[in-house]
Image: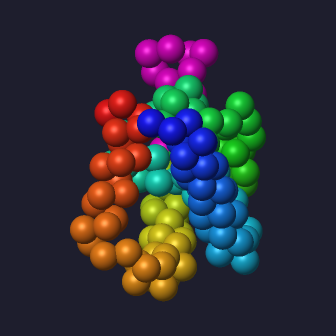
Amino acid sequence: MNTKSYYKAIHEIIKTGHWITDAVGQVLKEDKITEPQFNVLRILKGQKGSPITVQEIQERMVQRSSNVTRIIDKLLDKGLVKREECPTNRRKMDITITPFGLEELERFDQKVIEFHVPYTQNLTAEEAETLEKLIKKLKGE
């Protein structure tokens, strides 16, 4: 493979990732929620009510962040998550999404989906599948 082509492709992937993250951040900004906070809420929703630790949240985040505790504090202030001492390890805190957090996340999800709608017209389903496969291949998956 031509390394110049490889680096050009990588550069486009990086630029596109930042463009999407920034655009989603702008969509969520009017609700005073950040993209990392949105990501944490989605992780918690995926737990289906089961608690998760801050460390586990950090491991699952799209963008690894050392300030997950601060992100959770902001979500607590908004009533979107609940934090309780872990019953099996007092040094750990269990985090869950609140019913209000689930309602708000549904609203945030809808806004993000609406943002993506015009871009879904730019690729066919087959092209999107190929793109996904190529990105996974690049990562060695």
For the N terminus, the image quarter is top left
- Display coloring: rainbow
* Residue located farthest toward the left when viewing the structure as drawn: 126
Residue 40 at x, y = what percent?
55, 48
Q: Residue at x 28, y 60 (%)?
A: 129
The reply to whether the magenta stretch includes residue 79 is no
Image vertical order of residue 140 relative to residue 130, above or below: above
Image vertical order of residue 80 relative to residue 30, above or below: above
Q: Residue at x 36, y 48 (%)?
A: 134
The residue nearer to you, when weighing 17 against 107, is 17
Residue 23 at x, y = what percent?
66, 70
11 sits to left or right of 50:
right
Residue 82 at x, y = what percent?
56, 46
* Residue 43 seen in render: yes
Quarter holding residue 31: bottom right
Residue 94 at x, y = what percent?
51, 32
Q: Residue at x 46, y 47 (%)?
A: 43
Region rendered in magenta: 85-96
37 sits to left or right of 73:
left
137 sits to left or right of 16:
left
For the C terminus, the image quarter is top left
Q: Residue at x 60, y 55 (%)?
A: 12
